[in-house]
Amino acid sequence: MLQQCSISQVIQQNSEVIEQKLKALPRGVIFGDETYLGSRGNSDAEIVFINNEYETLSIGLADEGDLKTSILEAFHKIPEACRERLKILITDGEPSYKSIAKIFGSKVIHVAQLHTQKQRGEVIVSKYEKLGHHFLHYKIYTHWKAFYRNKYELTFKWEIKFIKGKIQKKRGRPRKADMSETKNERWRQKLEKYQSDSFQKEGTAKIFVNFETNKLSIRAGAKKWMIRMFTPIFKIFKGNNISTNTIESKHSQAKRKGAGRKQRDKESAHILYAHHTFLVEYRYI
């Protein structure tokens, strides 16, 4: 009990260093994942965000009843100056991470590596474009060895989906300001274009991957938005697999050995995990 109290005091006294310290965000990359202090099934889940330099940005306790809210809370613990520089979010296939990408719209590319047995090795690259209250969801389906080899044509499937957002209904007649001419708003024009029969909503495309020039070139069926989504990912994973190995290694580093015991409660587990991370990251052990 005394040990638990002392650990809590360390976390409280060093909260500015552990959770509020402003850290760099190289290439605008953030990795997000859930982990366990002990073995799976013997511990409560933690949500962890790190940068591309292996530094912890935030840690949050995961609520199994509302994982989406827990992920957003953990993400917003990252100092605003840091999280606003986000350009690429790399996670596993947990759907709740999409909520972060939606907040940023087309500014952020979300890379999801699927881990289920049937989908292992599959990667979905996506971004959201806000259309009024709605979204266009651009999705590219590829695999984790997409940029592993030198000079070859990469074939992939793609689709653009319309996601209808919630519109707050107002009572009574609309005011004149609400009845203004909005027909020519850019997002409405784009929505009409998407809804037309001539707009291609899915298909197959090819790009040429050149390791010598570090460029991706359009081939059959490809469009410029696909190149813009793939290029920053190619720069990160060139010659390597597209994976979440970076944050998985971070979990192992923080937990080490002897962290397999069942903790008394969720809060105790969270404090202990944050303490382990702090000690490892600042090289006290």
Image: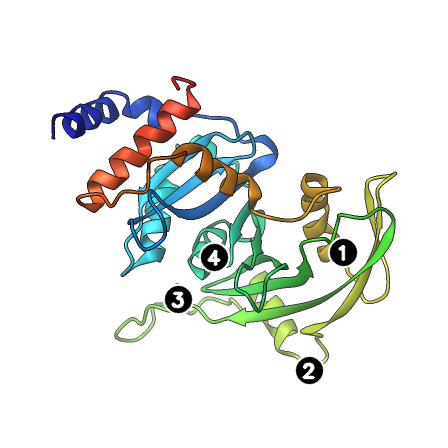
Label 3 close to label 4 by CB (< 8 Å)? no
According to the picture, the residue beneath numbered tag 1 turns out to be 224
Looking at the image, is mark 2 or mark 1 earlier in the sequence?
A: 2
On the question of residue 19 being in view, the answer is no
Q: Residue at x 87, y 39 (%)?
A: 213
Residue that mark 4 sits on: 98
Q: Quadrant of the N terminus?
A: top left
For marks 2 and 4, give the CA distance: 28 Å
Q: Is residue 81 left or right of residue 109?
A: left
In the visual, does 266 lie left or right of 231? left
From the top left corner, tell me how far across and down residue 131 is, in percent: 53, 63
Q: Secondary structure at mark 4?
A: helix
Q: Is residue 164 above or below residue 29?
A: below
Q: Residues within 10 Å of mark 1 (few under 14, many from 20)?
A: few
* Residue at the disc numbered 3: 178
Crowd band around label 2 with a 10 angstrom C-alpha radius: few (<14), some (14–19), many (20+):
few
- Whichever of callouts 2 and 4 sits on the residue coming sooner in the sequence is 4
The residue pinned by badge 2 equals: 197
Query: Residue 243 placed where, x, y %?
Result: 60, 48
Q: Say which label, 1 or 3, has the lower sequence index.
A: 3
In the image, what residue type sits under mark 4? Lys
